[in-house]
Image: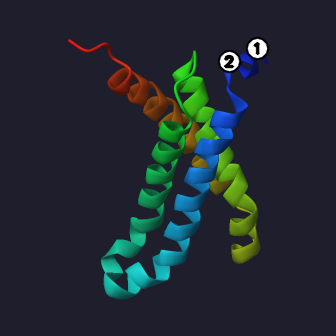
């Protein structure tokens, strides 16, 4: 649990809140998108999830360990929306939950690292 000391909780919650908002709005927009472009139905929700995890990691701020900060923000965003997903689908698919959670961790870690690398470089 030493990694927990390397996380800035207010920044993680700020990022998770932004990611949660993207997940909710993207999920609510899914029927409209599928109605307009039926072929988009297969890629819309996974695309929204990846974008939400990137947003959560980027808004999570730049802390000492940006990959851990980004992964924590993205996973927290997913954990915030998970009760809504279970409520709507009325089922618990553990494989889907594990897959999405691992995607959140991987995308969040990568996005946190890249965000800090790109936006905190010293000017040339």
Q: Residue furthest left?
A: 124
Q: Which quadrant of the figure contains the N terminus?
A: top right
Which of discs 1 and 2 lies nearer the camera? The answer is: 2
Residue 124 falls in image quadrant: top left
**Callout 2: SS:** helix
Q: Could you tell me if residue 32 is visible in this image?
A: yes
Please give the label number shown on residue 12: none
Residue 33 falls in image quadrant: bottom left
Q: Which residue does the numbered mark 2 point to in the structure image?
A: 6
Residue 98 in percent (x, y) is at 66, 47
Q: Nearer the viewer, residue 102 or 72?
A: 72
Side (left or right) of 72 relative to 31: right
Residue 31 in percent (x, y) is at 48, 82
Q: Which residue does the numbered mark 1 point to in the structure image?
A: 2
Q: Residue furthest right?
A: 1
Q: Local crowd at mark 1 within 10 Å, few (<14), some, or many (≥20)?
A: few
Residue 107 in percent (x, y) is at 48, 38
Q: Nearer the viewer, residue 14 or 112?
A: 14
Mark 1 touching mark 2, by CB under 8 A? yes
Q: Residue at x 48, y 65 (%)?
A: 45
Side (left or right) of 36 relative to 48: left
104 lies above or below 84: above
**Callout 1: SS:** helix
Q: Residue at x 42, y 24 (%)?
A: 116
Q: CA distance from mark 1 to mark 2?
A: 7 Å
Q: How many marks can you see?
A: 2
Residue 88 in percent (x, y) is at 70, 76
Q: Residue furthest bottom?
A: 35
36 lies above or below 113: below
Q: Residue at x 53, y 69 (%)?
A: 25
83 lies above or below 107: below
Q: Could you tell me if residue 98 is visible in this image?
A: no
């Amino acid at each position: 649990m030493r990694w927990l000391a390397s996380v800035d909780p207010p920044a993680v919650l700020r990022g998770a809140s932004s990611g949660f908002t993207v997940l909710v709005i993207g999920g609510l927009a899914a029927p409209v998108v599928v109605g307009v472009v039926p072929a988009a139905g297969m890629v819309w929700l996974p695309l929204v999830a990846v974008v939400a995890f990137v947003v959560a990691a980027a808004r999570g701020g730049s802390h000492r360990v940006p990959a851990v900060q980004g992964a924590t923000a993205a996973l927290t965003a997913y954990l915030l929306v998970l009760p809504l997903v279970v409520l709507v689908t009325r089922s618990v698919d553990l494989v889907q939950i594990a897959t999405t959670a691992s995607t959140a961790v991987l995308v969040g870690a990568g996005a946190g690292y890249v965000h800090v690398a790109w936006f905190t470089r010293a000017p040339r």
